Amino acid sequence: MSLAELGADVIKVEPPGGDPLRARREVAPDDLSFEYLNRRKRSISIDLESGEGRATLLELVASADAVIEDLDVETLDRMRLSFGTLRRAQPSVVLTSISSFGRSGPHDGWRANDFVLQAMGGVVDGTGWGDQPPQRLPGSPASFSAGLQAAALTSGAVYGVRAGEDGVHIDVSIQEAMSTHWTREIERYIYHGLGVSRGNVEMGLQGFPHTVMTRDGYLYLLALRAEWEPLGHFLGLDDFITHEWSDPQTRLERWDEIAPQFAANIAARSKYEWFADAAERGYTFAPVDDMQEVRQSPQLLARDFFGEAEIEGENVTTPGLPFTFAATPPRPNRVPGVGEHTTEVLAELRGG
Amino acid sequence: MRSYRPLKGVRVLTFEAAVTLPAATRVMADLGADVVQARRPGRAVDNFIATYDGTLINKQSIMIDLRMEEGRALALRLAAQADVVCNNFTPRVMRGFGLDYDGLRAVREDLIVMQLSGYGTPGPWANYPAYGPSVEAAGGLNSLIGNDGEVPVRIGSGVFADQLAGRYATVALLAALVHRQRTGEGQYIDLSMYEGIVHIHGQDVMAASAAGPDPVRRGNRDPAIAPQGIYPSDGEDQWIAISVETDAQWRALSECIGLGDASLARAAPRRERHDEIDEAIAAWTRQRSKHDAAELLQSRGVIAGPVQAPRDLAVDDGYIERGHFRPIRHREPIAGASWHPHLSQLPKINGARRSPLTEAHADGADNAAVLEGWLGLDASEIRHLHESGVTPTGIPLVTSTSDVLRRGPFDADHAERVGRAHGPDEF
């Protein structure tokens, strides 16, 4: 999806019945993952189980800079689609494979989805409150992160080919991609044997809770390395800014004494007032916004971040890329039907 | 086999701090780009960043005092030799030094310039400071973690959004390089860490926009499939993740846990009676280690995996077999060891060993090498810049052997565990 948003001509190769993810909305009508991920692409329907389909695919490969796939190994073997085969069709092809655990390793034959891969890759174990089980992250962050790694490496390899390097086979593991978001925590264990405790990470660091109710919703409070006296004053805790309270550990241990005034002060103002005033003082607070608030964020609207896609006759807000990139206009913001572009793509391919 | 370096010859000058942009330029360095961190005199690099994050690996460091006229002029001379110039300060900082896009493009028309900040420019929040966890909250992730009716949960990583925005920054920079290679045109990229968070769960924005109800906090459950959850395993704070996507997988799981109830054959009744099913699963998982239970369930076709803590991932057998860790040799021992395994930030390529890692350089350690290599300055010019304070020597990296945050779980035998799993160094 990121490559399509950047203006690449992304052709989605689907089996005659379509990508199985298309069926997800039959069981989860509100889940627009397929629609989100497949906007701006063209769809060609090819039966790769047939000789003719396989030949068509290799014709397509011959015209492509890169091939990206997330099929399982048995399917690829059955279709006889190895890197070597693709390379014979296009000698400098870049092949990027995305799989749960990578194309080698001890998890051969394991089944996985994003829920299990984020748990195996890290972060989940540290997420949640101490007295509850670890909590998953929303959406499919492990898969998205792997997808971004694939988009980046594919672009780097395409650059390399034009600069004289050979094509390559890039083997992306979703589990490994998730672990990059926990590099700090994993290395702290390797160096010092330290683990992560769920819950009040900043409570321990800064000596007050990190998520607190304001007049109109939750506020996230983060002020790492802040001096306590001005910060305590800003939070309205004038009774607790003397020297004896300056150590976060002390505030943590005697939190019961501070808690009532703290809660009352935070609740007296709106989360956006706190956010703006904190920013002015260099504190990195933030509103805990829900999805409706995100859609109306003045910052996102000022950045022209959103677009609109028509989905089943309805205009639906879609996020854009998280960066400006003027060079290449993206392709139309719509979701292709199965095989919608088969004729068009084949005509281009065959000099039509 | 030699390591893969498709970005060989690409020069990146990066005014960077914290984690997010350094994570992006680290990937470029691993792919063979010549990455020079331009640091400013001031506070030493945080120990977390220098030692654990690994974001300074494979880079050179030059220190320039941008408060001096000569320092700003030197930065522009370096920029003229660069392919990419980027920074992750709030936007007013580089503008103040005349090193924003207009200033940089004046010295090299086809430069690729990236301005990375918490909320992006323009906009009312453009100059608001942010760390990763701030934008995770503002971007709607926290509102979807945990259980409905309870306080929203923050993500249990200090650098989730940082690493994510770093990933987007890599995509943007590499796409810009491809574009320049084809057209000769430069690029201005303004990246918002906040928007990276919204983008990674864009389907929730779409759901909120469509006729459907707002997404809510569902804990570990799924709106369609059931059961799905994180269940207690044998041992202290040990957990297993299990996700049943199909009725066939449910049959396999129910046979394992001994819950023969024909009325649960379909997902709808399983969603209704999720609490009851969770209790039955937990009664079974409590009696086994998370690894044994995952192996057994997987052998029956059930989607399951251990919830891995840092102590598990540090010795993950798949990671070790696939060479996901590479050794890094220290100039001075850290925590009593001359080297440690570090997570690779690249996938596996052509089945070969992943790119080698060179330890972080102290601020300004490469002043002379960069001035000579990029600008062709001679020894007396380099000495002049040093003596006049334009390119001062930096503060040595703090790579402490203790850690102020020693709370929570701690393994005294970690060095033996890690050493046993990783074996001897292979440089």
Image (cartoon, grey):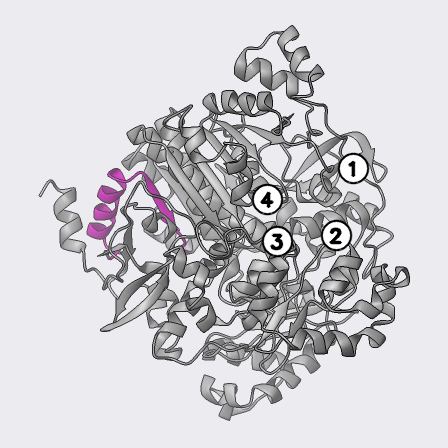
Where disc 2 sits, the SS reads: loop
- First-in-chain label (3 vs 1): 3
Is residue B227 found left or right of A284 in the rendered image? left
Q: Which mark is residue B131?
A: 3
What separation in Å lies between label 4 and label 2 (alpha carbons)? 39 Å
Q: Is residue B223 above or below residue B24?
A: below
Q: Is residue A107 left or right of residue A20?
A: right
Q: Which residue is mark 4?
A: B322
Residue B274 location, quadrant: bottom right
Report the magenta residues as a range: A47-71
Q: CA distance from mark 3 to mark 1?
A: 21 Å
The amino acid at mark 4 is Arg
Q: Are marks 4 and 1 on the same chain?
A: yes
Residue at (25%, 47%) from the top-left corner? A57
Judged from the image, the secondary structure of the residue bearing numbered disc 4 is loop
Callout 1 amino acid: Val
Task: Please provide percent x and percent y for residue B109.
Answer: 37, 26
Chain letter of the residue carrying label 1: B
Is residue A163 located in the magenta-colored stretch of the structure?
A: no
Q: Mark 2 and mark 4 in contact (Cβ < 8 Å)?
A: no
Q: On screen, B84 above or below B160?
A: above
Q: Please give the name of the residue rendered at 59% of the width and 16% of the height, measured from the top-left corner.
A: B371
Chain letter of mark 2 equals A
Q: Residues within 10 Å of mark 1 (few under 14, many from 20)?
A: some
Question: Could you tell me which quadrant the N terminus of chain B lies in?
Answer: top right
**Residue A225 badge:** 2
Same chain letter for marks 3 and 2: no
Mark whose residue sits in front, 1 or 2: 2
